[in-house]
Amino acid sequence: MKTFKILTVLFSFLIVLSCKEKEQEKVKAIDVLSFVDPFISTEGDHGHWHPSALVPFGMVKLGPDTFPSSLTGDGDWAHSGYNYSDSIVRGFSHFRTGSSGGGSIHDRAGLLSLLPFHTITNDDWIKNPTSEIDKATEQASPGYYSVLLEEQGIQAELTATSYVGMHRYSFKKTEDAKVLLSSGNSSLTNDLHYNVVDEHTIEGYFDKINGPYFTIVFNKPLIKNEEQGKHDKSVGNFICDFGKLTEPLLVKVGVSFTSINSANKNLKATCTTWDFENVKLEAEKLWRDRLSGIKIRGNNTRDKRIFYTALYHSCFLPIVQSDYDGTFLGFDAQLHMAENYKHYNGFAFWDSFRTKYPLYSLFCPDVYSDITSSIYDVYKYANNWDPFPNSDHKPHKSPLFSAHGKDGSTAFSTCRHEHMLMVMTDAYYKGLFHDELDIKDVYPYLKEETLLQMPKSYDSIGFIPARPDQTGEYSWDNWCVAALAKTLNKNDDYSYFTKRANYWKNSWDPEIKFFRARSADGKWLDFPEDPRDNREKYTYEGSKWHWRWNALHNMNGMIEALGGNKAFVEALDYFFENDLYTAGNQIDLHAPFLFNEAGAPWLTQKWVNQLVKKRTTQLYGTHGFFKEPILDYVYKDTPDGFLEEMDGDFGCMSAWYNLAAIGLYQTCPGDTKFQISTPIFEEITLDAFNVPFHIVCANFSEDNIYIQSAKLNGEDLKRSWLSYAEIAKGGKLELTLSKEPNKSWTIK
């Protein structure tokens, strides 16, 4: 009898184990790449991404520059050089940024372009090449792009490694096969220098402080002809003629920011084959491995497409700028070696610190660790932060806080460095520093960054005159330095920076309960009759309502300033009920998660679901009201994937969606708590840790958006947040959902 019981228990255990294994296999069987559509958010003024062939964080972003948008975009379209609405290409370039940037009309095409052709269609073609494409043939997937150049009858296919762009051109067999090499961007035509090394190789560089440098290798020999002689020169555009070909022309373009020799080494190290399909498959594998860091399960295909494409876009920037062997060019214009890490650059911290780096800590902490070492390199080798510490702090009229080095050197694709120290602080408290990186060595630089942006000269008044927004932002930075000073037992620094972390209170007008500009003598300056107006007179890209929740680091103090939990929740709910929230800009991205902080998590659940899943009325563009309110989804799975005027901003907006969709959002980098909201997927697995972290939703449905109860590793969870340590050690968060809110689940 005892034997029978043992066998019965064993049999039951095996059945349960088998079911779990089948469920795991079911999740694993889903190919995440099938949910990535590189054309999402590539049309018009809806994100400014691009469908280039690239690998995660790769130096090469090989894709089409389209006409006319890349020449005529005035900040409203084609920031990346590509617009889905165009049906003409100017070439296929290897370097681009995309997702951010406005301003006046200028050439937005990428750098280092190739364009296959048979015939020159007009006298101006060499200088301004174009080729009509068949939009119906345009395809893109992670690591691959292809299109038929309809006018020329040439099939163009692209793939990439981190350092190499690989082209496959299928020409008509009856006509001469040619490729135009150009700068890509017309403003840099005279900066392109090249040398034809032999019949298979061209080398060159851009005459800029940090290149880039390149080596181009063809699988077919170049030939000379009279036509080529007309345009042959060592600066500018160059025609590569191969005669008639019976099989595709293959081209490999290796790149580097340090030297031509390094470009050649990068090519040889990362692209040893002429097998285009193998290179494409390897790129796909890199994407599959990276994006599988978060696994989701559910029947909502549209949401999966938006989710994995957003996760894909979050891996475009920053980029690896060290060579394959670790060599990189520092801001001091000297070569350095990245030991045991990859050196990244291509940052826009103000845009992305609040969402992208918290996301990285959940699904690619290895990259985050490398980024912290790379930031340390910025601190060590940059020596010029002009105009800081002497900035006049005017909204939109003074230069951004950005690192420069010897002879004005900058980093390719890098935009701005505000709140870089918050990224470092966040990584440190999450345990993501490499062993070689010591916070004692880093701390002086973080302290210096804080004092550059808010010099000690402001201590006598305790705010930035006429800038309540920056007073608040610099308070975040000072809070980070204070926290680190306490950790390092630097008591004087702790006291000093804690005081400065409260300067935001000096820009808070308790009579009207809004942040308000003050003159240097302490007098309150003019305030708009309607705080909904976005005047941009004293604040950056936002109304007084948008900036009202600006004490990220001291939400308890923020709640108290508004009159306590009840008053805070009422004001915040009014903000959302009256469509005052702007989903298209960074300033108030944390706002829907603040209900958790004030004991009303059901409202976080309500409003996050509204923004992620439903059509929402939006009143604001970047610099003011839309002409007419827009009722639309914030995120879509179409080429107009973002709201109008909504930039991708170096992955910030994509990362916001990813965090909101899995129900975990960090409102203040440096404070490692993640606020809990209701996921839009039935099951989520964060698979980048030694032990996976699972989120499982019971009673999951489209209507059941409210959390009734929660368990963490089998124990009741009576708070609406998790620490990063709780997530990173692995385990399970179980959420029971319902159609009605549970207002008793409100313990902070």
Image: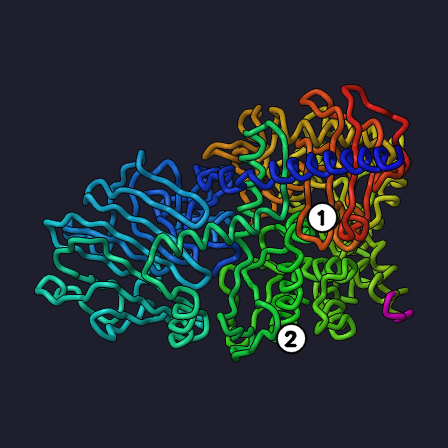
Residue 692 is marked as: 1
| Dot 1 amino acid type | Pro
Residue 619: x %, y % from top left:
61, 29
Q: Cβ–Cβ below 8 Å for labels 2 and 1?
A: no
Mark 2 crowdedness (10 Å alpha carbons): few <14, some 14-19, many ≥20: some
| Residue 490, magenta (yes or no) | yes
Q: Quadrant of the N terminus?
A: top right
For the point 63% across and 27% down, the residue is 613
| Dot 2 amino acid type | Lys
In-front residue for pair 247/135: 247
Residue 380 is marked as: 2
Task: Estimate the spatial distance between the alpha carbons at disc 2 and disc 1, rounded to whole Å.
Answer: 36 Å
Callout 2 secondary element: helix
Whether residue 613 is visible to the viewer of this picture, yes or no, is: yes
Q: Is residue 468 left or right of residue 185?
A: right
For the point 65% across and 50% down, the residue is 363
Q: Closer to the N terminus: mark 2 or mark 1? A: 2
Q: Is residue 240 left or right of residue 59?
A: left
Residue 646: x %, y % from top left:
55, 39
**Residue stretch in magenta:** 487-491
| Residue 175, magenta (yes or no) | no
In-front residue for pair 93/516: 93
Name the front one of labels 2 and 1: 1
Question: Residue 673, relative to residue 256: is it above or below?
Answer: above
Q: Main secondary structure of the magenta part?
A: loop
Question: Residue 51, relative to residue 635: is it above or below?
Answer: below
In-front residue for pair 556/534: 556
Callout 1 secondary element: loop
Residue 259: x %, y % from top left:
41, 75
